Amino acid sequence: METIKTKINMKLNTIKRIGRSDFVNMGPIKLRQPLPNQGIDIVDPFILLHHYGPYEINEKSNPFDLGPHPHRGFEPITFLIQGEQLHRDSLGNESVVKAGDVQWTTAGRGIIHAEGPTEEFVAKGGVLEGIQLWLNLPAKKKMMEANYQHAKHEDFRIIKSKDGKVKTRIVAGELNQTFGRIGTQTPVNAFLIEAKAEGKESILFSKEQQGMLYLLKGKVKVNGSTVLELDKNQLIQFHHDGEGFSIEAKENSLLLFLSGEPFNEPVSTYGPYVMNTQTEIMEAMRDYQMGKMGFLPAN
């Protein structure tokens, strides 16, 4: 469903911090890590943002094949930009995630999952690219039941700019009374913004939420002055002092906007676990070793 958005006058959120998206090595994988990076530690409630690919995948080269591994205490989320991945988990879910799809896993008390390019995709070869986001859960929900949601590209609701050159895909949350397909545990917005060259748009979000904007490709001007460009500045964190932000695409571009109400709680992380204390981390490690997070065989 598509809706034409009415542009309104609004007070722009000023920019708090601007960050790069440098490459880091994660085992055999080289990927961009805009969060945490360069003084931007956490944008509460967002813990980590990885931009993987684009990788050329074929039978001789398949670095992004993650076997069974556990998570607890947060929500690992994948926005697949290009390619095709298979998701399997200890809840019994098995689904093929295609370009434009989003998989939203609520690890809660514990889940084991595996993801990687499908056998068919590897056989024919192609490009794989995506975003892996870690969204924290508040203390009261860290031990909730695990859950998995898969939303397909064609099912997302879209808001069009007045000039018709910008499409904002509502993955989760709400924009102008248009709601996302994904159910969330806390107040959070996740929008994919696709802009053609010279397209202009304004995006509203609540002052109660921390907001950040990440550039996946292209070049855009934000709030009339700050430029986001690949290999230079790609991440913006906003202050809580306005009603939203504006963009003007200088070339065809793709952006991810995220906002959420901060928890202001202590964060303790280790490997695949995000908890509030070191004791809880130790408990998570023990529970995984004892099989309390379920079981998922390797392929």
Image (cartoon, rainbow, N blue to C red):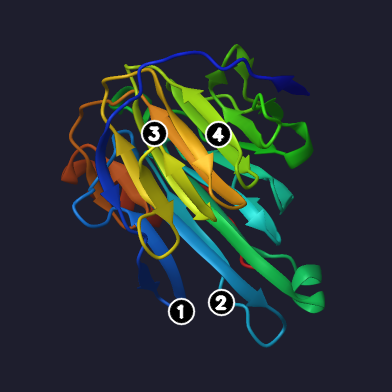
Position of residue 177 measured from the top left corner of the image (x, y, whole percent):
60, 11
Label 3: how many Cα within 10 Å (few below 14, some 14–19, many 20+): some
Marks 1/3 in contact by CB < 8 Å: the verdict is no
Label 2: how many Cα within 10 Å (few below 14, some 14–19, many 20+): some
How far apart, in angstroms, are the residues tagged by discs 1 and 3?
38 Å
Marks 2/3 in contact by CB < 8 Å: the verdict is no
Up the image or down, 71 lies above or below 203; here it is: below
How far apart, in angstroms, are the residues tagged by discs 2 and 3?
38 Å
The residue singled out by tag 2 in the image is: 63
Residue 191 badge: 4
- Looking at the image, can residue 285 be seen? yes
Position of residue 10 measured from the top left corner of the image (x, y, whole percent):
41, 15
Nearer to us of marks 1 and 3 is 3
Q: Which badge, 1 or 3, is on the more N-terminal residue?
A: 1
What amino acid type is highlighted by mark number 3? Answer: Asn
How far apart, in angstroms, are the residues tagged by discs 3 and 4?
18 Å
The residue singled out by tag 3 in the image is: 223
Quarter the N terminus occupies = top right
Left/right placement of residue 38 relative to residue 208 reads left
User: To which quarter of the image does residue 154 belong?
Assistant: top right
Label 4: how many Cα within 10 Å (few below 14, some 14–19, many 20+): many
* 110 vs 247, nearest the viewer: 247
How far apart, in angstroms, are the residues tagged by discs 1 and 2?
6 Å
Left/right placement of residue 52 relative to residue 72 reads right
Q: Residue at x 45, y 25 (%)?
A: 188
* 199 vs 287, nearest the viewer: 199
